[in-house]
Image: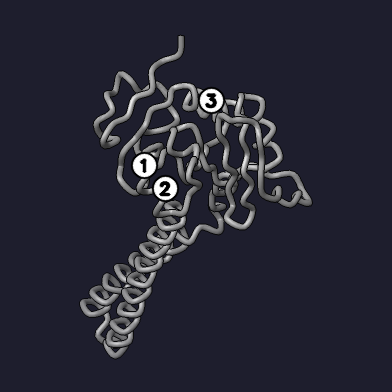
Amino acid sequence: MSDPIRTFRHFRDVPQNLWRWPNFSPAEIACRGTGQIKLHPDALDKLQALRDRLGKPLIVRSAYRSPEHNRTVGGAKASKHMDGTAFDIAMSNHDPVAFEAAARAVGFLGFGFYPRSGFIHVDLGPARQWGERFPVRATAFAEEAPPAREVLADSRTMKGGGAAGVATLGAAGVEVAQGVLAETQSAILPLVPYLDTLRWVFIAVALGGIAVTIYARLDDWRRGRR
């Protein structure tokens, strides 16, 4: 006997003990316009089975729709979205051919193809399909590769930090030399102002290296967030 279908006024009202689909959240399945949600366990079980079979995230563009929201977006009058048995899944991270095969294998029967909008509609049936299938890719869909770690020798952070460190030591060394010359060699006192200029050059280089290091860290952080 299948679990009963339940409707909640808002996805935040769904009790935790009723939610058994680990790769999805009530917010993903709820109506985008009203926050209402209809739990159709059989449909959600198939959605989770599809996620498990494909082994990578499903981006749900639309799941349950309240009747008023369905009218607002121009959905079919008898849209399966209003039953909680339909899902529109983005193809941005899937090969459409492999996705369709997997969806049929887990028991979805209704298919709508929207290549211009970049998603496939799946539902529990009856068996039917509409729309033009996605064009076949010239090459197989590649898994998304994790960001490559920066080679240490090319690291902007290392270069900036290294320049700052060397320049800081140089500035300190010049300052020590100034003091020694001023105390011991009165004959070369005219060189002391030039050493003072050199010390400020080192300080400027050190500040530049620190700025490069900070910029590199912030840029790497922004890239990691994309």
Q: Which residue is drawn at the image coordinates 36% and 38% (left, top)?
A: 30
Q: Are marks 1 and 2 in contact (CB under 8 Å)?
A: yes
**Labels 2 and 3: the sequence-earlier one:** 3
Looking at the image, is mark 1 or mark 3 nearer the viewer?
A: 1
- Give how far apart the Cα atoms at labels 1 and 3 are: 21 Å
Amino acid type at circle 3 is Lys
Secondary structure state at the residue bearing disc 1: loop
Percent position of residue 131, x then y: 67, 49
Q: Quadrant of residue 29?
A: top left
Residue 138 in the figure: left or right of residue 5: right
Question: Disc count in the image?
Answer: 3
Residue labelled with disc 1: 66
**Labels 1 and 3: the sequence-earlier one:** 3
- Give how far apart the Cα atoms at labels 2 and 3 are: 23 Å
- Give how far apart the Cα atoms at labels 1 and 2 are: 6 Å
Percent position of residue 197, x then y: 31, 84
Q: Are marks 2 and 3 in contact (CB under 8 Å)?
A: no
Residue labelled with disc 2: 70
Q: Residues within 10 Å of mark 3 (few under 14, many from 20)?
A: some
